[in-house]
């Protein structure tokens, strides 16, 4: 997922992500999102860790078949020691998925399939670490929630 993070301006950074692909059978696949994170620790002189509040929104669509929307509000903390950054956070999240599809068995037989799904997770606790290797950033974290998640990734940063 291509993502651009710009900041910091007065302790605030903006995140934008976007992906679009037109598939001949199912239509347009579109993923987009944005977020803002603001530093709270900048207001506390000599505070030993970085603390920030964040809000993020994301949508995902596949033609007229699938639409998902998610929102996350959270408090995040981090501490950089050399090339390693330790981080943790607590957040509230919500997600809704809607699916509408008509299965065409034969020209005379069509079966509509439609449902909505709301996420099980409401709150999440995350802990992880990141390695800053010049322009290469590598991270791994674990999120404790009703549906636990392990994330591993890499990015290019300046």
Image (cartoon, helix red, strand yellow):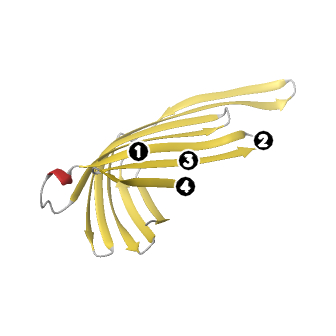
Q: Residues within 10 Å of mark 1 (few under 14, many from 20)?
A: some
User: Marks 1 and 3, how far apart in space?
Assistant: 12 Å
Of the image marks 4 and 1, the number of the one nearer the N terminus:
4
In x, y percent, where is residue 134?
42, 75
User: Who is closer to the viewer here, 117 or 126?
Assistant: 126
User: Marks 4 and 1, how far apart in space?
Assistant: 14 Å
Q: Is residue 120 visible?
A: no
Q: Residues within 10 Å of mark 4 (few under 14, many from 20)?
A: few
In the picture, the disc for residue 2 is: 4
Q: Could you tell me which secondary element the residue under label 1 belongs to?
A: strand
Of the image marks 2 and 4, the number of the one nearer the N terminus:
4
Circle 2 residue? 25
Q: In front of the other: label 2 or label 4?
A: 4
Within the image, what quadrant is residue 122 found in? top left
67 versus 40 height, above or below: above
Q: In front of the other: label 2 or label 1?
A: 1
Q: Could you tell me which secondary element the residue under label 4 belongs to?
A: loop
Of the image marks 3 and 2, the number of the one nearer the N terminus:
3
Q: Residues within 10 Å of mark 3 (few under 14, many from 20)?
A: some
Circle 1 residue? 35
Q: Could you tell me which secondary element the residue under label 3 belongs to?
A: strand
Tell me what residue is drawn at x 78 percent, y 43 percent: 24
In x, y percent, where is residue 114?
63, 28
- Badges 4 and 1: C-beta atoms under 8 Å apart? no
In x, y percent, where is residue 50?
23, 58
Q: In front of the other: label 3 or label 2?
A: 3
Q: Quadrant of the C terminus?
A: bottom left
User: Who is closer to the viewer here, 137 or 147?
Assistant: 137
Q: Quadrant of the N terminus?
A: bottom right
Of the image marks 3 and 4, the number of the one nearer the N terminus:
4
């Amino acid at each position: 997922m291509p993502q651009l993070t710009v900041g910091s301006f007065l302790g605030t950074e903006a995140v934008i992500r976007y992906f679009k692909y037109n598939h001949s059978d199912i239509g347009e696949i579109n993923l987009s999102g944005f977020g803002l994170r603001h530093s709270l620790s900048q207001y506390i002189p000599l505070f030993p860790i970085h603390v920030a509040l964040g809000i993020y929104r994301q949508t995902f669509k596949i033609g007229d078949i699938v639409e998902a929307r998610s929102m996350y509000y959270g408090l995040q903390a981090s501490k950089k020691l050399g090339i390693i950054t330790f981080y943790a956070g607590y957040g509230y999240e919500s997600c809704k998925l809607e699916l509408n599809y008509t299965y065409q068995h034969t020209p005379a037989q069509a079966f509509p399939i439609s449902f909505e799904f709301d996420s099980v997770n409401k709150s999440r606790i995350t802990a992880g670490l990141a390695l800053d290797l010049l322009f290469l950033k590598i991270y791994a974290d674990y999120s404790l929630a009703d549906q636990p998640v392990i994330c591993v990734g890499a990015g290019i940063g300046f």
